[in-house]
Image (cartoon, rainbow, N blue to C red):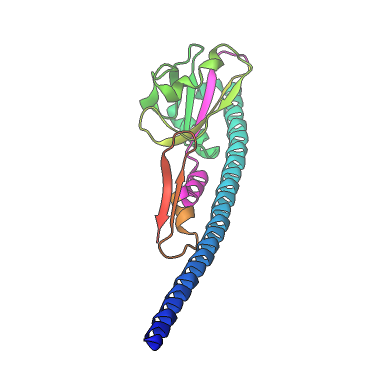
């Protein structure tokens, strides 16, 4: 009987020891997982912030460049007024200046000429993308460049820069499809960045916009 009690006691001690060991291992594993997750999340945030900074710097650089091109085209048309209504010549100038579109606006904000006749008649009331440039009508000292935005006519992602000509009688706008920027945005979008992170089995990463609460990317292994 005494021997039986000793065996039972020994088994109980072993069970308790195993449970204790399992609890310790779980605590250690949970702590390691928490530490690993925090390091990984910090890395995701750092990469996303760096990508945003790089993209913003590129956008500002492109804006400066496109404004210069718009002013250069405006000057070329002022110097040679004969090309103002000549679509073929304007298309040659667009190619020379490495822009996709040239649009001439009257002082009321309506396109009356340019390298793309299909846009003639569009004005600053023709849609949200066009309305962005309405401040130009009140201040002829302005030059403006828009962020990457789907254009009104086709929904194609473009950047537009606009300036008044020297005597303030018309506005000159150039439109460029910023392929380098679009490629960089595509490569560095949240889904691709998150998917490229080294994650452990059964780990899930979700990235949501803090303002809209919408999940913009995620990855599960």
Report x, y in % for residue 143. Answer: 60, 23
Does residue 9 appear to the left or right of 31 in the view shown?
left
Q: Is residue 135 above or below residue 59?
A: above
For residue 123, above or below residue 175? above
Q: Is residue 52 above or below residue 90?
A: below
Residue 119 location (% of width, % of height): 39, 25
Q: Is residue 126 magenta?
A: no
Q: Nearer the viewer, residue 93 or 187?
A: 187
Which residue lies at the image location 41% right of the left edge and 39% below the top edge?
214
Is 172 one of the magenta-colored residues? yes
Furthest residue to the front? Answer: 1
Question: Picture coordinates of residue 98 (x, y %)?
Answer: 53, 40
Per the rendered image, the range of residues in magenta is 167-190
Where 120 falls versus 67 (above or below)?
A: above
Q: Quadrant of the N terminus?
A: bottom left
Query: Percent from the top left, x then y, of residue 144?
Result: 57, 25
**Quarter of the figure that contains the C terminus:** bottom left
Q: Nearer the viewer, residue 9 or 73?
A: 9
Residue at x-position 44% and y-position 34%:
212
């Amino acid at each position: 009987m005494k021997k039986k009690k000793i065996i039972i006691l020994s088994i109980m001690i072993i069970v308790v020891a195993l449970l204790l060991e399992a609890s310790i291992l779980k605590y250690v594993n949970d702590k390691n997982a928490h530490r690993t997750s925090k390091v990984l999340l910090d890395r995701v945030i750092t990469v996303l912030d760096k990508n945003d900074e790089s993209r913003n710097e590129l956008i500002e650089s492109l804006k400066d460049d496109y404004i210069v091109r718009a002013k250069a085209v405006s000057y070329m048309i002022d110097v040679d007024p004969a090309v103002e209504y000549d679509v073929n010549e304007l298309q040659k100038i667009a190619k020379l200046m490495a822009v996709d579109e040239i649009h001439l606006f009257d002082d009321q904000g309506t396109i009356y000429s340019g390298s793309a006749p299909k846009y003639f008649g569009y004005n600053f009331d023709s849609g949200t993308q066009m309305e962005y440039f309405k401040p130009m009508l009140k201040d002829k000292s302005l030059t403006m460049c828009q962020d990457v935005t789907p254009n009104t006519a086709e929904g194609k992602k473009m950047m537009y820069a606009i300036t008044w000509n020297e005597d303030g009688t018309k506005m000159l706008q150039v439109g460029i499809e910023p392929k380098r920027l679009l490629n960089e945005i595509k490569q560095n979008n949240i889904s691709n960045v998150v998917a490229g992170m080294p994650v452990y089995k059964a780990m899930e990463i979700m990235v949501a916009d803090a303002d809209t609460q919408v999940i913009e990317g995620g990855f599960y292994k």
